[in-house]
Every structure is written in structure tokens, then in C-alpha cells.
Amino acid sequence: MMTATNSQADLIAHPTEFKLVYNTSLQRLVVLSTTDAQTSEITAEVTYAVADPSIVRVDEFGVVRPLGDGTTAITISHPDGQTEVSVQVSESDKSAPVSFELDVQPILAARGCSAGACHGKQRGQNGFQLSLLGFDSNFDFNALTREGRGRRVFPAAPQQSLLLTKPAGQVPHGGGERLPVDGVDYNTILRWINDGMPRSIPDEPTLSGVTVFPELRDMRPNESQQLVVTAHYSNGSSRDVTGQTAFQSNESAIVGVDDLGVVTAGPIAGEATIMARFMGAIATTKVLIPLAGDVPDSEYEKLPVKNFIDELVWEKLKRLRITPSGTCSDSTYIRRVYVDIIGRLPTPDETREFINSEAADKRDVLVDQLLQMPEYGDHWANKWVDLLRPNPYRVGIKAVLNY
């Protein structure tokens, strides 16, 4: 489905085909221009042409919304080339039934309402408590519809419900404005209250997982990239949930991300992972910002490869354009390998024995010897404890100490 007018660049559109069910659904398109040298997002620079304009419309941001039932194609054009995506629309004359678990709770989690700093904390906030990030749907449903004598939702006048007026900033709210009145999320909760606040909908599927596009991206300093998050359900359906997803960067100084899923590379080179969280399901995007300049391929081709880990490390250095360091001295090597593997410095005798050895494979032999030492297990067990954080309140203090 792709043709290119410029042999040096290709257009990649995501998703290439999708379905829109009900008139409240939408799908974000992301368009990338790729060459051997780099990839750039050009979603805002392309033009969209719908084969049958009575079925869908596409705005300037690449958001597709349904107009009528049927199947049509959207042609995406740019000086770099042209590509096409297919869309199928059904039940465009109906609004989607609102599910508490699949629609309302994700909004509360993405807007921070059920976060640990707000109503998701241990005792809630100002008399209103939600489960942390929505892990307990029954608790949250009762908190919203039953507690406080039903004061949080008002079916007789849904717009007057505290669940809407507070996050919309219409009455004083310590958390500020979270749900603009003209936003999709506000209207979703409004429809849920209008529908009688059902606990579930007929044939309600369960969330199977989420995916994010793109999963890996090399970016230049100060460049931006829109992420698209897709939720997949047990009945085989999927939908765009980017607007109801919470995003977080593990290295915000290198790569930042806003509430809309727009990733922005910082001014310095490095690597960061963007986490996309939707109701307990997580997907990640890895972003790399290479150093300026080029490194000859010969610098990487001459590097020794003893196992697959070496291959991964050398490939990462190449992508980041990091010039490999030269081979370190024996004295430096023994100090590093002891600290890395068993967590202590070598003794003077161990150091002298290693430096004075003339064996060609003495470095490999030393690694094997250290891996057989009891200190290796102790040192790395502690490292895994730091990562796994075993909780004595859940598994018992005996299990934690035994570990």
C-alpha cells in the first residue's frame, strides 16, 4: 500500500488498518518519514484525502473520527512519498455504552485522581478515597456511587455531579482542573452518569494488554514524537486509548513526555524509556538521542564478540555514536571485574598474581573463577532485592530474610 516518490525516504503510517465502532470512537494516525540516516515524525506536515468523505473525517492532527458506516481508504501524501491506510466504520449512529472499568476508571487513573498523591493515598483525600491506580474496581464503584450519601454523582442533573464539577474546576478543587468541560473524558463520565452509572455493560470484555507505537525511536535534540497507545481486549477488539493513558519518563532530563503522549528529546545525548500505563497494563517506548557527529563503522567492526551480550552492547554504542574505549590495563580490569561480580576490591596478592600472569586467556579465566565464589551469590542477591523490593507485609519477614 506504499509508494514513494523519493527513493531516499519511505512513509510509515500507523495503524495501517483499523476499525471504528460507534460515533464516539477515534483513532490517532502517526506518520513517519524514514531514511537510512534518520526517522522523523511528519504527521503535522502531510495531507489526508479520504476516498469516501461520508464515512470518516481526518483533522489536521491526524485524528480520524467516524461519520457513517462503511469501509474506506485514507491517502496520506508528503513530498517524501505517499501511503494509504484502511478504516472500517460500524454503528456510527450510536454512542458507545460506557463501561465503569474500561472507560471511567482509566480516566480517573490517567488524570491522577487515583494516584498516590491524591485520592489513591492510604486514607484518601478530603474524605474521598479511591483504590491506588484503580486496582479495586468494586471499591471505586462503591466510593463513587454509594458513599457520602450519593453526593458524588447526581443522576437527576448529571452536570451537577461533584465527580464532574470538581475536576472541571467549576467548584473549588485542590487538584485543579483535570477534566475540561469540552473534553472527551468529561463527556465520557457524563454519559456514564446519564446511563444510570452501570457497574458493567453487556458482554463486557476484559483488558488483555496494551501496545505503544513506536516502540523504539532514535531522535535528534529538541525533536518531538507523538505516541499512540492501543488497548487490546479479550473479544479481539482494540481501540486507541492514548488520551486515557498515563505517561512517565525514567530520564526526564534526557527525554520528556506530556499528558498527551508527546515525547520531546532534550538537548543532551542519552537514552530513556517512556512508560505508558493504562489500567495496570504497561507498554514502553525506548528513545535514543545519539551524539553529534559520525563514528566510522570500522571502530565497531574490530570490537571482540565473545557472546550475545557483547553484540548488544556494541550495537547500542553504535546507535548512540559512542566511540568505543580502548582496552584497559590489567590493574584496571581486575579492580572493575571484582567490584562488578562480587562487590569487593581484589586483595594485593590477588592483584599481583593476575598482573604477573602471562596466560592469554587470564581475563576469561578470572571471570569464571569469580562466578564460582560465594560472594557472587551474596552480592547479586542484594542487587535483586533492591530491584524486586520484597515486602515483608505481603510475603512475611521469614520469606524476605530467606531470600
Image: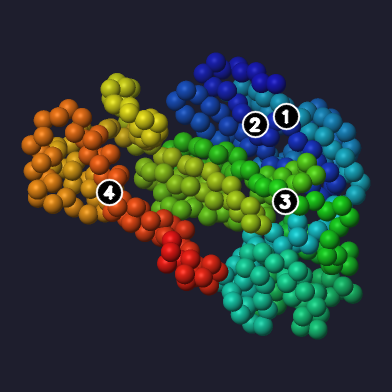
Question: Residue beneath label 1, please?
Answer: 85
Q: CA distance from mark 3 to mark 1?
A: 26 Å
- Badge 3: how crowded within 10 Å, few (<14), some, or many (20+)? some
Q: Are marks 2 and 1 in contact (CB under 8 Å)?
A: yes
Q: Amino acid at mark 1?
A: Val
| Element type where label 1 sits in the image | strand
Work out whether 390 lies above or below 368: below
Which mark is nearer the camera, 3 or 1?
3
Q: Amino acid at mark 3?
A: Leu
**Residue located at (87% from left, 73% from top):** 155
**Residue located at (60% from left, 51% from top):** 282
**Label at residue 13:** 2
- Badge 1: how crowded within 10 Å, few (<14), some, or many (20+)? some
Q: Quadrant of residue 298?
A: top left
Instruction: Classify the position of the N terminus by image quarter.
Output: top right
Work out whether 228 lies above or below 189: above
Instruction: Classify the position of the C terminus by image quarter.
Output: bottom left
Residue 150: percent from the left, percent from the top? Answer: 81, 80
Q: Are marks 3 and 1 in contact (CB under 8 Å)?
A: no
Q: Amino acid at mark 2?
A: Ala
Q: Amino acid at mark 4?
A: Met
| Element type where label 2 sits in the image | strand
